[in-house]
Amino acid sequence: MTDSPKRIVLITGASGGIGLAAAKLFFAKGDRVYGLSRRPCPEAGIESICADVTDEAAVRNAIKTVIGLEGRLDVLVCNAGFGISGAVEFTADADAKRQFDVNFFGTSNCIRAALPEMRRQGSGMIIVTSSVAGMLSIPFQAYYSASKAALNSLVLATANEVRPYGVRVAAIMPGDIKTGFTAARTKSNAGSSDYAALSKSVATMERDEQNGMSPDVIARCMYSVSRKRNPKPLRSVGLQYKACCLLGKFLPCRLSNWIVGKMYASK
């Protein structure tokens, strides 16, 4: 069964993981789907656009191409991203900057390129893949957590800016998801002799990810949000992660941070 009318959807990071799951679902629901990623989307029916979200000109050209072909852009899913792990003290400057270039500025590039058309239309939906780590900072994932916290702030501010133009903006905050994200993580063991908890923390994190929920769960959440007239600006997925976000919101900061530390920074 499909929903109507058919929408024009652009999904970044669509070559695998959550992005691919979302592309397949939106397409199955009857939407016209374009996948923007560095590698072609392997799914039949998805129109691939090869581009890197950190290349502002390439992103603008890609969105211009979609609008030129279709006459509009109804849904933008900003999903491209990756993770780095390691101790803050020993994280290379280039790695930290690359983390923000992809996760934060790459998303910003896509949003800024799509907004002129969405404002002109008087409608549009922008969905950003954030993380529970944006609410509860994870030890030895400091820069990843910071990039997602920055995305949450970007979403909240942008949602208020564009609401008068009929454009909706929301972030989905997954927890542990079983995808290729784990294998693609940039890991640094530098300083492991000084930070005894580093190796254990990363191993715990990766075990949790490989036992995590299917990316299809996040894709279904994205689709549901895309259909809402007034979506929550920040939405976690799954009872466990909803509870984590609530604890982070209502417990004293010192206590919630201590709990996270016991989970991920104990020797």
Image (cartoon, rainbow, N blue to C red):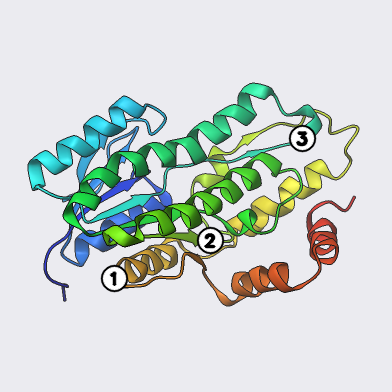
Looking at the image, which residue is at 20% across and 67% down? 29
- Tell me the mark number nearer the camera, choosing from 1 and 2: 1
From the image, tell me which residue sits under label 2.
Answer: 174
Question: What amino acid is labelled 3 in the image?
Answer: Val
Amino acid tagged 2? Pro
What residue does disc 1 label?
227
Lower sequence index among marks 1 and 3: 3
Q: CA distance from mark 1 to mark 3?
A: 40 Å
- Of the two numbered discs 1 and 3 in the rendering, the one whose residue sits closer to the viewer: 1
Name the element at disc 2. loop
3 or 2: tag closer to the N-terminus: 3
User: Left of 182 or right of it: where is 2?
Assistant: left
Q: Residues within 10 Å of mark 3 (few under 14, many from 20)?
A: some
Q: Which mark is residue 259?
A: none
Q: Residue at the spot x=8%, y=42% of the render?
A: 69
Query: Amino acid type of disc 1?
Result: Arg
How many angstroms separate mark 1 from mark 2 (CA)? 19 Å
Residue 263 spot, x, y in % from top left: 80, 60
Residue 169 position, x and y percent, is 39, 59
Which residue is under mark 3? 88
Q: Residues within 10 Å of mark 2 (few under 14, many from 20)?
A: many
Which quadrant is home to the N terminus?
bottom left
Q: Earlier in the sequence, mark 1 or mark 2?
A: 2
Q: In the figure, is residue 1 to the left or right of 179?
A: left
Q: Nearer the viewer, residue 127 or 169?
A: 169
- The secondary element bearing badge 1 is classed as loop
Please state the horizontal and vertical placement of residue 208, each as a whole percent of the image.
Answer: 65, 59
